[in-house]
Amino acid sequence: MDKVKELQRMIDESKNIVFFGGAGVSTESNIPDFRSADGLYHEKYKYPPEQIVSHTFFVRKTELFYDFYKNKMMYLEAKPNAAHVKLAELEAAGKLKAVITQNIDGLHQLAGSKNVLELHGSIHRNYCQRCGRFFDADYVKQSGAIPRCSCGGIIKPDVVLYEEGLDQDVIRKSIQAISRADMLIIGGTSLVVYPAAGFIDYFRGKYLVVINKSETAREVGANLTIQEPIGEVLEKITV
Ligand code: ZN
């Protein structure tokens, strides 16, 4: 059976779709997953990415954190791909109610999505740790080795680092959206990263679809599994 046709039928039938996406949604916009480190980058940084992107590292080696963060996590030239665009169209048509994302690049909003729940924060929000003033991504990217506020305080990205907890309000809204959905599309994630795996348990709807280029690590009992890049799949969907 043609899997895209099957997906189209499910979308046509559904009225409350929720999308849950991971790093794979952004790779088609040429944003590599910072965890998939290549050899060069190991040579340059000497620390594993998970260690650099941790709260302790941010506090103790702020300059090195920002060197990595600006080079490997801030892709300000990236453009939304077909997946972002189609999801925004589905929301505008009233069929999709929420996008829950593990990405921090803001590409869903750039494509026009309104209800985006960012589990890991966003590179587009940065705040002074001393006075609370907010700064955009350009300011941080173009600042010196350690971005500072005019008050002298060090700026911190509103991104959830390792050792830091997720925003409880975002978690609550995500669970609420999933528990109300009649269709849940999971895309571009291996489902191993907390809290993705646990979220699926709240789904009570009819259609659970997994779209991921590589095999998903966890058997989730999906009604439909498509092992292809998410953008290439959603591009074929008619809203
Ligand atoms: Zn300040």
Image (cartoon, grey):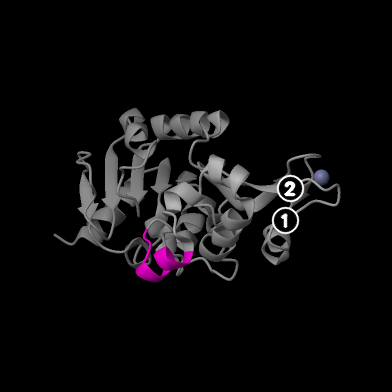
Q: Residue at x 34, y 47 (%)?
A: 186
Q: Amino acid at mark 1?
A: Pro
The spot of residue 71 in percent (x, y) is 55, 65
Is residue 173 at least partly visible in the picture?
yes
Q: Which mark sits nearer the N-terminus, 2 or 1?
A: 1
Residue 168 is tagged as none
What is the chief secondary structure element of the magenta stretch? helix
Crowding near the residue tagged with mark 2, few <14, some 14–19, many ≥20 C-alpha atoms within 10 Å:
some
Mark 2, residue position: 154
**Residue 41 magenta:** yes
Q: Amino acid at mark 2?
A: Ile
The spot of residue 78 in percent (x, y) is 54, 69
What is the magenta range? 36-44
The image quarter containing residue 175 is: top left
Quadrant occupied by the N terminus: bottom left
Asked which secondary structure carries label 2, the reply is loop
How many numbered marks, from 0 up?
Answer: 2
Mark 1, residue position: 147
Crowding near the residue tagged with mark 1, few <14, some 14–19, many ≥20 C-alpha atoms within 10 Å:
many
**Residue 129 magenta:** no
| Beta carbon at label 1 within 8 Å of ligand 1 | no
The spot of residue 22 in percent (x, y) is 40, 51
Quadrant occupied by the C terminus: bottom left
